Image (cartoon, rainbow, N blue to C red):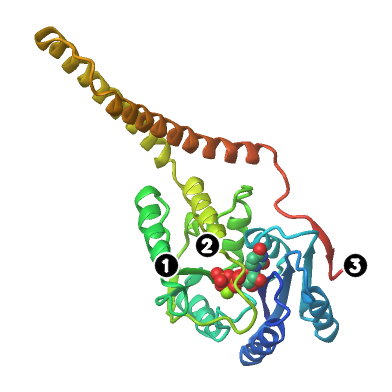
Amino acid sequence: MKKELLTVIVPCYNEQESLFYFYEEIVKIAEQMKSLNFEFLFVNDGSKDQTLSIIKELSHKDKRVRYVSFSRNFGKEAAMYAGLEHSKGDYVTLMDADLQDPPALLIEMYSAIKNDGYDVVGTRRVTRKGEPPIRSFFARCFYKLINRMSKVEMVDGARDYRLMTRQVVDAILSLKEYNRYSKGLFSFVGFDTKWIEYENVKRVAGETKWSFWKLFIYALNGITAFSTVPLILSGVIGILFCLISFIAIIVIIIKTLTVGDPTVGWPSLVCIIFFVSGVQLFCIGIMGQYLSKTYLETKHRPIYVVKETDKN
Ligand code: UDP
Ligand code: MG
């Protein structure tokens, strides 16, 4: 019987320090999973260091190593999408290059798909050890918020590290949106998913590519991509303010008719004007977010641009 193929997709952005450790580890796991053929697909996301030359070196040594290299940095979402598009495997896994996604879990993940009939096995960090506490705090708030607002469930601590069957990969590839938020896309396509939990692992080398600001923008992107509740919210706030002002007008009319209108209270008036115009700007901002996303989607720009692959 022909052996099935497992593709390991590795998005890499400035990972020269971690690549060798990663390659060593993944090869060890591949040796333990003898019933499968492996394909290691590195996606170089416009790295400015030696990442690409290290990948090329690996591909000369090892026929299983393939690569796709972008013309510039397009972000991890684009790198994952490119990996999925170029993967040939019957099973596909997405793994970070920094060994924060323990390759050893792959054995258990594969067995869940092969023996227990799952379509997807996802991984979840149950601790956020080694992460700045403020970041963990905001991450938790974000998951609470987005799960209230979106019908698609987002699992707190879920990683992009997962093993999928070809059917699931094709389903994800059929979602061609430009503003990609993979955690949501993975839940959106559904399928029987098993979650494996593990403790947070520190990066083997190099530094995280995510600043607080980048994560904040990414979180906003996740909300606007998977929920329209903010739009409803801005409408509700508008109605609320109309009601309040309507009641206030009636109160003022009655007051003027009964006790007259001494001209006092302009500071409070200024405060109210500031407050209401603030709310208006906020609501316009929310609408602007959705509009800008729609604008970008209608341009139909490619999600990434390839400069070279292992074939040339
Ligand atoms: N990454 C990428 N493009 C980017 C940023 C990150 O391909 O613009 C890759 C990075 O090389 C790594 C993975 O995405 O393999 C996760 O990045 P990182 O470890 O910096 O994120 P963290 O684990 O801190 O969330
Ligand atoms: Mg990492």
**Residue identified by numbered label 1:** 134
**Residue identified by numbered label 2:** 212
| Residue 308 on image: x %, y % | 85, 64
Q: CA distance from mark 2 to mark 1?
A: 10 Å
Depicted 89 relative to depicted 141: above or below:
below
User: Could you tell me which residue is drawn at 64 percent across and 40 percent down?
Assistant: 296
Among the two numbered marks 1 and 3 on one chain, the one whose residue lies closer to the N terminus? 1
User: Could you tell me which residue is drawn at 53 percent across and 40 percent down?
Assistant: 289
Pointer 1 residue Cβ closer than 8 Å to ligand 1: no
Residue 312: give its label: 3
Q: Decide: marks 2, 1 in contact (CB < 8 A)?
A: yes
Q: Which of the 4 quarters of the picture holds residue 208? A: bottom right
Q: Decide: marks 3, 2 in contact (CB < 8 A)?
A: no
| Residue 95 on image: x %, y % | 61, 74
Element carrying mark 2: helix
Depicted 81 relative to depicted 301: above or below:
below
Q: Is residue 142 left or right of residue 113?
A: left
Q: Which of the 4 quarters of the picture holds residue 4? A: bottom right
Among the two numbered marks 3 and 2 on one chain, the one whose residue lies closer to the N terminus? 2
Q: CA distance from mark 1 to mark 3?
A: 45 Å
Q: Is residue 257 left or right of residue 129?
A: left
